[in-house]
Amino acid sequence: MKTPYIKSVRKLLMGVLLVIACHGYAATYYVSTTGDDDNSGTFSSPFLTIQRGTNAATAGDLVYVRGGTYSERITISSSGTAANKIVLSGYAAEAVILDGQNLLPTGSYPAARYVPLLAITGSYVELRSLTVKNSRGRGVGVDDGAGEVSNVLLFNVDANHNWNAGIHVKNVSSVTVDSCKVSNNAFSNAPPNRGVANWPGSLMITDSLDCVVKNCAVFENHGEGIIDLRSDNSLIEGNFCYDNLKINIYLDNSQSSIVRKNLVYSSGNTLYWRFSDHPTPGIVVNNEAYSTQNFCREISIVNNLVYNTGELFGIWSQVANSTFQNVTVAHNTFVNTLTGTAGFTSRGIHVAARGTKTNVLFQNNIISHGSGAIASGAPTGVTFLCNNWSSFVTGGFSNSNDVIGNPQLTLGGGTPDADWFKLTALSPAIDQAHAISGLITDYFGATRGVLPDIGGHEFVKANPPAVLSLLFATAVSTDQTEEVPSGLIAPSRPNGF
């Protein structure tokens, strides 16, 4: 059965291929496993190596790679322009595989683990529709070492079984990772080597500005899933993220970033459990210790769906004097149905005592928890308001406007699906949220009512009152770029989300 992610990517890919076909490029080069690097690079006389093709390309050029497996290390160092990008793409529907065979990049360890098999060091570059696998270091790397790379697009890239990160974006600006599949990376931490060395993340945004990760499937990796590390103004939206060993979505020293409309879960595959008795956490905000700190602030975590992770949501800190400022966690649905020995020590919401929290808001969330502590830690500095807890909470976690009881979600069996998190007509969460300015839609794109619902789904009544419908229209028309940080455009959602 095709997953929503696969169906969505196929539709997007058909549109992209049409756009490429209709675009007038300055020159089009071809690469084939039957070519020769002394050829002219035409369709009938293709180059042999991808590197030869990218060396020939200048601003406005397209390099098509014909189907087959290529074993080489590639660097795209030339830059395009805003109007004339350099595009490296698989040809039509032919499967293009860049395979490091666990031999490339060459060099001594551990230095080699930080070298990408495919490096992009130029700006205004697009990489489309190919697989990068079995790198001895990173899969795809976007980084020139000088912080001057910008405006790069990775689309429909499949990064898998790389020893370090599948995709690593570092010290750059305006890079978009769209509709990519990132799986079985951080392979240096796979059994029997687990815990021998520090584990890497799998899709990493590091020390960067204005980057986007959207519509991706990030799963079954042996480190973190998606990491926003010491970066500013990032958008992580519309991703499937599951069974990543350490943390599924991780914001570490992140500022002005948004995490929204992601489906995060554990399938129960114990190979990817962080600890022996429960899965890895879902979404975590943390301040780890670095020589230059970028303590978390101006963060928005909204309309996410999290299921059966070892900790549904956490605010951690490894630095005693760290700060968390202006963090909003709202309209998420957190569900843990784990019971018995498996998952018994799982936690629902956890707030570490370390670090000073200022204007941190946890509002309009559903927390349905099967076993273990539904809320733990030290909530000082965090405002909890209008949440639907499946059982009573005490102390700073509770609020007089809370709803206590089963949220009456749809749920289901088998592989988690976004529809599981929809409210049924009997849900006590309906109409019980307090409206938050700027949050005008739910996970599914439905407009929230004047009396919004708690959680990631807005239940649509058969006949809403006419006066409320009129108020809706007035409110919606005032803001068309919902919760988007400055300089970013709201990404479209693929079918199936």
Image (cartoon, helix red, strand yellow):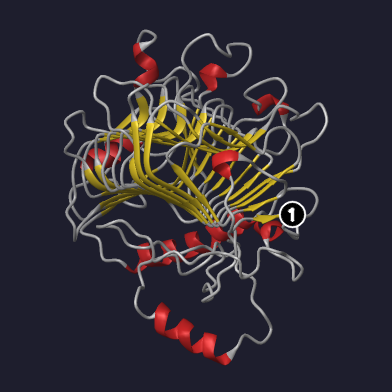
x and y, in percent, of residue 253 in the image: 34, 33
User: In the depicted view, which residue is nearer to us: 222 or 137?
Assistant: 222
480 over 74 or under it: above or below? below
Residue at the image position 61 percent from the left and 56 percent from the top: 402
Of the 4 image quadrants, the one containing the C terminus is bottom right
x and y, in percent, of residue 391 in the image: 72, 46
* Circle 1 SS class: loop
Of the 4 image quadrants, the one containing the N terminus is bottom right
Q: Is residue 454 visible?
A: yes
Residue at the image position 42 percent from the left and 62 percent from the top: 16
Determine the image quadrant of residue 50.
Answer: top left
Give the class, few, some or many, for how many residues have Cα within 10 Å of label 1's Cα (few <14, many ≥20): some
User: In the depicted view, which residue is nearer to us: 282 or 466?
Assistant: 466
Residue at the image position 59 percent from the left and 19 percent from the top: 190
Q: Which residue is mark 1?
A: 405
x and y, in percent, of residue 346 in the image: 68, 31
User: In the depicted view, which residue is nearer to us: 381 or 165?
Assistant: 381
